[in-house]
Structures are given as structure tokens and as C-alpha cells.
Amino acid sequence: MNPKLEFCGSFLEITDFVYDKRAAEAGWEDDCSFGITVQSGRFSGSVNCSGSLRAVQAFIAELEALTDFRRSEVTWQEVWNGSTVTFSGDGCGHITVSGVLAEDRTDSAHSLKFRFLTDQTVYPQFIRAMKSL
């Protein structure tokens, strides 16, 4: 099952996660790849991402800290295409998901700037699914 964070019709979903053990053993920084799909209101977009499994695991731990009120903000920054996803908590259980999905870092690339509201009740299932990647 793909990790999917959904609230009031908007969502963020992690798709097609692949961990390349040989790349990790060779010391490559990008040992996993995955897609991020966002539906924000009537707008949607998808982007391919890469990163290290270590960075993904650290992001999951930071997301848990956010939902436990030990952090106020967590950001995933994709190295190659410049996409970002930020989770910002208000300290009362409301978490805004915002960012930019970008095709690449050039000014002529297609991109989706998004922002939608969630609350902490939808995060336990999302985090469990992220941990199972």
C-alpha cells in the first residue's frame, strides 16, 4: 500500500518506492527512488524523486516529532529537481502541507505550487505506511 495522506479531498501520496541495495553498498547517496503525487483542491501534479534511505528514515522520524508537538516544521527537499514538501504545525493539531513539485530546476520547467490543511489524526496511518517502505 502506498503511503497516502488525505484530508478533505486533498492528498499527498508516495508511489513506486524502490530501494537499490547495490547502490547503497556502492556508497551512492541516491539509493532509493519514488514518486510524489499531490492533489490540492482542483490542481494536481506528480514528480519523480530520489534520495537516500537514511534521509527518508530521518524524515519519518522528524514527521513523528511534528505530530508529537516536538517540532513545528519538517521539510523534504529533493536534490535533483528542486521539489519541496513542507509540513507546518500550529501547535494545536492542524498541519499545513505546502510546497512545489518541479520537473527540474530550470525556470522553463512545469511546476505545481500547492498548500492544503490537514490535522494530526490522519498522520499515524501515513507514518506507519512510510515506515513499511
Image (tube, rainbow, N blue to C red):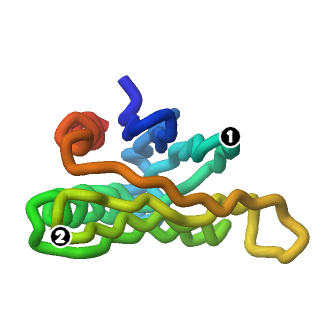
Q: Nearer the viewer, residue 98 or 85?
A: 98
Q: Nearer the viewer, residue 113 or 91?
A: 91
User: Is residue 73 shown left or right of residue 36?
Assistant: left
| Residue shown at 53% from the left, 56% from the top | 50
| For residue 79, above or below residue 125 | below
State the mark number for residue 91.
2
Q: Quadrant of residue 131?
A: top left
User: Given the image, on which type of amino acid does mark 1 rest?
Assistant: Arg
- Mark 1–mark 2 distance (CA, rounded to whole Å): 28 Å
Q: Classify the position of the N terminus by image quarter.
A: top left
| For residue 104, above or below residue 15 | below
| Mark 1 or 2, nearer chain start | 1
User: Given the image, on which type of amino acid does mark 2 rest?
Assistant: Gly
Give the labeled residue for mark 1: 42
Q: Position of residue 4 (x, y in %)?
A: 39, 35
Q: Position of residue 64 (x, y in %)?
A: 16, 57
User: Is residue 126 shown left or right of residue 66?
Assistant: right
| Residue shown at 50% from the left, 63% from the top | 98
User: Is residue 71 shown left or right of residue 82?
Assistant: left
| For residue 92, above or below residue 130 | below
Q: Are marks 1 and 2 in contact (CB under 8 Å)?
A: no
Q: Nearer the viewer, residue 22 or 94?
A: 94
- Please identify the residue farthest to the top as the structure is shown: 1
Q: Classify the position of the C terminus by image quarter.
A: top left
| Residue shown at 36% from the left, 35% from the top | 3
Q: Position of residue 56 (x, y in %)?
A: 33, 57
Label 2: how many residues lie within 10 Å, few (<14), some (14-19) or many (20+)? some
Secondary structure, mark 2, is: loop
Q: Position of residue 34 (x, y in %)?
A: 51, 44
| For residue 128, above or below residue 28 | above
| Residue shown at 42% from the left, 48% from the top | 22
